[in-house]
Amino acid sequence: MRAASAWGHGLPGGREASAGDVAETMVASLRIWFVALRISVEERLVYRADFALSTLMRFLPIVTQIFLWWAVFEGIQTVGGGRETIRGYSYNDFIAYYLLTMLSRAFSSMPGLASGITRDIRDGTVKKYLIQPVDMLSFLLAYRVAHKLVYYAVAAGPFALVFFLCRGYFPGWPDPPVLAAYVASLVMAFLLGFFLEATIGMIGFWFLEVRSLLFVYMLFNFFLSGHMFPLDMLPGMWGDVVGALPLQYLAYFPTAVFLGKVSGADLAGGVCIQLAWVVFFITTARVAMARGLRRYSGYGG
Amino acid sequence: MTAVPERPDYLRVFLTFARNSLVREMIFRGNFIIDTISSMAWVLINLAFYTLIFRYTPMLGADTGWGKYQFFLFLATTLIVNSLVRGLFMENADEFGELIRTGNLDFVLLKPMDTQFLVSLNRIEWSALGNLVLGLLLLFYALGKVDYRPGPVQVVLYPLYIGCGVAILYSLMITLAASSVWLVRNQSLFNFWFYITNFSRYPMEIYRGDFGTPLRLFFTFIVPVLVVVNVPARLLVRPLAPQSVEDAVLPLFALVAAAGSLAASRWVFNRALVSYRSASS
């Protein structure tokens, strides 16, 4: 089997592709892409009520965070000095931070992506991508985009409600350029999340059982993406190490941009590094898939 | 059934369940080790988070007495209660919904034993033991770091209140699971359980103010999840002499709450069995 090219697949019969063939293939790919999108949208809408309810539930832990951080700040004030921020974050910033990381995570989290890929490899479903003129990564990306679009459509209500109720915690809308950078970093958070997890999923070509590895990744992701606390709180060396990892761009970075914690040259630099990570993982996922498929052997029907 | 020859030996049945579960887990030893390590890793991550918080603040709230190591005692108590609930009941409650959905509950109903007992304790999750050990280690470590020494009365009362906490959480869990008779799909309900117990993870003093006080009262007296960890944990960090009316009432209330929750869950469970209509094939 020929290794998959950037957007497509080897042409049948092994003949060289002409310009016409390429155009035809492109159109076919796009059509497949849209079908994948539509299937996924329909699939997700089946359980919409359950879905909206669980989205609203997901905000419940924020309630405990509101009280926890209030207590933390109260504790700080008892020792005098009247310090009212932790590493530049006020109490309101903390609450806004948690709400915004939920939004970042709505873009960057990819439930079941890596485990799905490894499962497909293990049980041989991956063969269908080799036989059918569908590129696995493109298909999964389309599927994921659809999944997310439906998610946003349903979750917009609960999100808007909670953000409206908590509007007092927010410092207000950032300037248009910052807002643009924020949106860009969210989109890149989605791409980074997708290709990072896809890369991890491709490890399944080499090791059959990667459940524990995925768990370790999830653990690190939860702690080091900034989902649990603003990464600025990490002291000294820890902060430097975490700052060098790509995980922070999944939750912390977009949020910090919105809250104005990164600005000027840091902001521009951060967006560039995020883009570089996205490109890096697109490449890695592609290379890993190409190599993996070369190793892969499927038997039977 | 009209004539039951002899009362079944519940303890022996439970021990058999426990042994069978252990044998079962030992068949997939790698899986067992991964489960144990991964749940312990979550605990360590949480511990790291709280250690980080206490780098910045000496105490949670003003004059609440919940300093770093006092809070670690609280955390240890949470761990102990949660690992017991998880080890004994979690998988069973999860399975209960499945029994209802598939109609396999029929086979449980046929057995000459209490159905709630069979459903609740059928499988023991031994990998929860790791967290229990971690909880105990944290408990002794933190006890060595605080000035206050709990007296003999507290030492006796602590396990009792741990038991009450387990009873309350169990009741909540089995009630939610039983409700799948009426709802069938209960995924959100289990999330709900997770989010509700989320409130039990912090000292109740932090729920204050216009919004916090009603919340605290609700989760103390209506759905008593705040009692679960707070009452035993308080035994370890401060003298028995109550400082307020609430302080005096709470330990007594915890006993009532535990008994009440068990009774209520029993009632819901039986109602669920009455409404159960199998799933004939």
Image (cartoon, coloured by chain):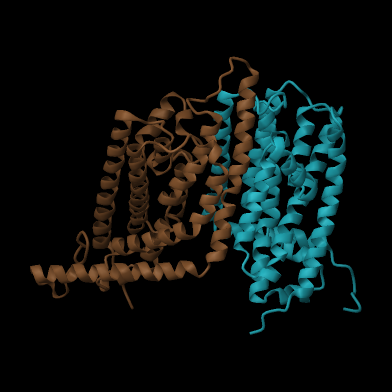
What is the quadrant of the C terminus of chain A in the image? bottom left
Does the rendering let one see residue A274?
A: yes
Please tell me the colour of chain B: cyan
Residue shown at 84% from the left, 63% from the top? B9
Q: Which residue occupies the foreground of this view, B196 or B104?
A: B196
Q: Is residue A29 left or right of residue B148?
A: left
Residue shown at 33% from the left, 71% from the top? A35
Does the rendering let one see residue B45?
A: no
Residue A270: name its quadrant.
Answer: top left
Residue A178 position, x and y percent, is: 35, 37
Q: Is residue A80 left or right of residue A216?
A: right
Residue A146: name its quadrant.
Answer: bottom left
Residue A133 position, x and y percent, is: 24, 71
Please tell me the colour of chain A: brown
Residue shown at 56% from the left, 65% from the top? A49
What is the quadrant of the N terminus of chain A in the image? bottom left
Against A205, is A80 above or below? Answer: above
Q: Is residue B191 left or right of residue A255?
A: right
Residue B22 position, x and y percent, is: 65, 57
Residue B219 position, x and y percent, is: 74, 46
Q: Residue furthest top?
A: A81
